Image (cartoon, rainbow, N blue to C red):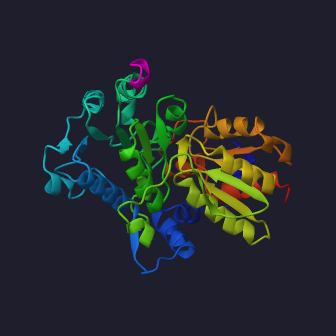
Amino acid sequence: MSGALKSLFKQPMAARLAARSPRALAAAAARRNSSVAGESITVREALNQAIDEEMERDESVWLLGEEVAQYNGAYKVSKGLLDKYGPKRVVDTPITEMGFAGIAVGAAFHGTKPICEFMTFNFAMQAIDQIINSGAKTHYMSGGFAKCPIVFRGPNGAAAGVAAQHSQDYASWYGQIPGLKVVSPYDAEDAKGLMKAAIRDPNPVVVLENELMYGVSFPLTSELANKDFVLPFGKAKVAREGSDITIATYSRPVAFALQAAELLAKEGISAEVINLRSIRPLDLETIVKSVKKTNHLITVEQGFPKFGMGSEISAQIMESEAFDYLDAPVCRVTGADVPMPYAQNLEALALPDAEVIYRQAKRVLNVE
């Protein structure tokens, strides 16, 4: 076990778990943001809006998956869509990921625009052949003849108390595949803008959401309320500007990185937090620009440490002009190199939180 994880035993477990809860994340987000009208929107509602607006805009868009229709979705992301668009465009499927993913890919080849929901991306392993060998590669293998405008979406990464088979982060898995575009939203802005962009894109897009972020509220801005609000792929967002160290991350860990930045600020350390948003294509330019300013880089992810997103970012930074600006090696903050434990105390120790990021940032900066 790393020194950073060992140090966490000194903090009461209840306090650390409370700081990681969706309610705590929502409160922190509210402190950092404000909307003109004082209204808010959850990540779940943002995804629902995006799908609704795109189904209304384009009749070729349709949704399928387990419990997406009559039950309004396992996480209520598709709430109300069956009533509005009917059973031909919102389709409940049997519990057979390989089957309904194959149906969705075939329908995309024939000109429709399916949104294929997986109850969790852990279950998408049953459909990995359809996603990669059929969805991602056929456009190339057909010489550009067969297009596959499809969205694969669902929760990804660790949730709470769901153990080893339901907690994996698949960003680096899908990010390796030519022919796929991969995004991972953090907040409501990301969720709506990236989902709309994914549906409109003519290529297969994997949207990696996070179960514990669905109920977190963020400010509803006028831009977010616009039906044409779309975020570009391959463009990260600087969530917090800083000058001493760069923290690059995506999905739920963005919240922990922002919390860590607040802790560091109390000690006079200025951390820049980058919300990657897009996994493939990766916005290396924004990371390089930040590193050239801060001279230090930490990557944060909930996935395993071997061959992960942090490894890829570290390699690309080493191969870029940013390497000459580094005053210390890149630090990778990841999940533990073990299958996710079921016990709550061990689960908490297996995942990086604000305290781990804070301590690693001070280590990189050689600050006691």
Q: Residue furthest bottom?
A: 37
Was residue 143 drawn as part of the magenta stretch in this picture? yes
Give the camera-side residue of 181 and 57.
Answer: 57
Residue 26 appears left or right of 56: right
Give the camera-side residue of 95 and 79.
Answer: 79
Q: Residue at x 51, y 47 (%)?
A: 233
Residue 81 appears left or right of 164: left
For the question of whether residue 9 can be seen, the reply is: no
Report the quarter where the C terminus lies. bottom right
Was residue 26 drawn as part of the magenta stretch in this picture? no
Q: Residue at x 57, y 54 (%)?
A: 253
Residue 74 spot, x, y in % from top left? 28, 50
- The vertical placement of 282 against 139, above or below, is below
Residue 206 image-quadrant placement? top left
Q: Residue at x 47, y 77 (%)?
A: 35
Residue 343 spot, x, y in % from top left? 49, 47
Residue 272 image-quadrant placement? bottom right
Report the quarter where the N terminus lies. top right
Q: How many marks?
A: 0
For the question of whether residue 40 can be seen, the reply is: yes
Residue 63 appears left or right of 223: left
Residues shaded magenta = 139-144
Q: Residue at x 55, y 47 (%)?
A: 346
Residue 297 spot, x, y in % from top left? 74, 49
